[in-house]
Image (tube, rainbow, N blue to C red):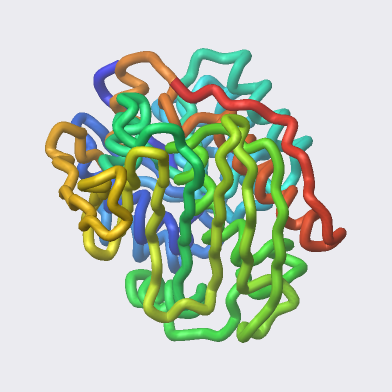
């Protein structure tokens, strides 16, 4: 398939900040229709991004025969419903994160994906140079046996994120954020930001066997959690920690992997991946050797470019696929249950990482 004709369902913040700008960088790709509930947003986004058609009817995107690929950019309670409709209609699908807050929905989505030939990319996007390089170092044995891994993904909160979104949408600032509304969102920072930390750990270390977690609300005006910490047991025997939240004004996006021969430390702020290993195995005080990992060997693609490449190759994304999204969903749900019941929760789903 050469030309991609994309429809986007959802005309909110994520469509404005990510889907529409990134899709403009994809070769032989056109966004032909944008669907959303607010006509004012449709008018602004279609004007800014040269989208020829808009609709307030989501089904119109599904039914349009010109459209061969659909991006689901809705609030997460609607992800699976409209993702499955798009798959059944023969469209390739780009699924926003989190996949769902229900394992029944996640299972149904994976089953539908498996029954069709369309390419389905499910966020978070993991095929970035930091994750790919870390996977290569592990597979080549440079870190030795992996003992532990840690990740953190956190920022200052939805109100900070949406301040920039409202500027793009040409809207006045508002305190009415659905992220904080427990009736609309049903989950908080864990699913919003923790999904990135968990996905990074799954992408580099592998499947998770059990989760122990604690969630709390520190500062935000919500009944939902704004801070969470998790201890993970991986199938390969390694342990991990994941932290997330909406109360980190300085923003943190990082992970590290530790092994018997060395460690890798990734920092998105510093845009660096560093490899550390001992200069001596018999002198505890000997200095560590530090190397900056050469990332030029790995493709620099945004998530929509990767989606398009997978569509044209007729494959599922190697990492960011439906089964990985289901596994990440189960980990997040297990963290909620662990915190609520004050116990460790086992994970039953498996991965399809290539």
Looking at the picture, tell me which residue is in the foreground, 144 or 112. 144
Quick one: which residue is furthest to the front in this view? 282
Res. 94 in view: no
156 over 94 or under it: above or below: below
User: Percent position (x, y) of residue 76?
Assistant: 62, 52
User: Percent position (x, y) of residue 156?
Assistant: 46, 77
Is 161 left, or right, of 221 in this rendering?
left
Q: Residue at x 77, y 62 (%)?
A: 339
Looking at the picture, tell me which residue is in the foreground, 323 or 335. 335
246 over 124 or under it: above or below: below
100 over 318 or under it: above or below: below
Task: For the N terminus, give its image quadrant.
Answer: top left
Is 35 left, or right, of 341 in this rendering?
left
Looking at the picture, tell me which residue is in the foreground, 213 or 42. 213
Q: Residue at x 71, y 42 (%)?
A: 210
Q: Quadrant of residue 337?
A: bottom right
Q: Residue at x 23, y 63 (%)?
A: 270
Q: Report how many numbered discs are placed on residues in the image.
A: 0
């Amino acid at each position: 398939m050469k030309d991609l004709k994309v429809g986007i369902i959802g005309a909110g913040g994520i469509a404005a900040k990510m889907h529409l700008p990134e899709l403009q960088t994809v070769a032989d790709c056109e966004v032909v229709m944008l669907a959303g509930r607010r006509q004012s947003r449709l008018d602004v986004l279609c004007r800014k991004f040269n989208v020829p058609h808009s609709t307030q009817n989501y089904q119109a995107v599904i039914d349009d025969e010109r459209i061969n690929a659909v991006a689901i950019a809705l609030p997460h309670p609607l992800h699976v419903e409209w993702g499955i409709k798009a798959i059944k209609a023969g469209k390739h699908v780009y699924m926003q994160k989190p996949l769902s807050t229900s394992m029944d929905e996640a299972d149904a989505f994976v089953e539908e994906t498996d029954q069709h030939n369309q390419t389905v990319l499910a966020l978070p996007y993991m095929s970035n140079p930091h994750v790919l390089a870390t996977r290569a170092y592990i597979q080549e044995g440079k870190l030795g046996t992996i003992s532990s891994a840690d990740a953190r993904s956190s920022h200052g909160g939805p109100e900070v994120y949406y301040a920039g979104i409202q500027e793009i949408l040409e809207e006045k600032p508002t305190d009415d954020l659905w992220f904080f509304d427990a009736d609309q969102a049903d989950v908080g920072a864990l699913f919003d930001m923790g999904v990135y930390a968990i996905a990074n750990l799954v992408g580099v270390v592998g499947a998770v066997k059990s989760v122990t977690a604690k969630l709390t609300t520190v500062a935000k005006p919500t009944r939902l959690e704004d801070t969470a910490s998790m201890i993970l047991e991986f199938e390969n025997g390694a342990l991990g920690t994941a932290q997330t939240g909406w109360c980190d004004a300085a923003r943190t996006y990082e992970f590290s992997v530790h092994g018997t021969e060395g460690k890798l430390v990734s920092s998105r702020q510093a845009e660096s991946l560093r490899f550390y290993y001992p200069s001596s195995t018999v002198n505890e005080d000997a200095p560590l050797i530090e190397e900056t990992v050469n990332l030029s060997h790995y493709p620099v693609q945004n998530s929509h470019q990767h989606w398009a490449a997978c569509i044209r190759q007729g494959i599922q994304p190697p990492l960011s696929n439906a089964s990985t999204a289901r596994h990440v969903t189960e980990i997040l749900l297990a963290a909620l249950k662990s915190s609520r019941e004050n116990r460790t929760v086992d994970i039953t789903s498996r991965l399809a990482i290539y």
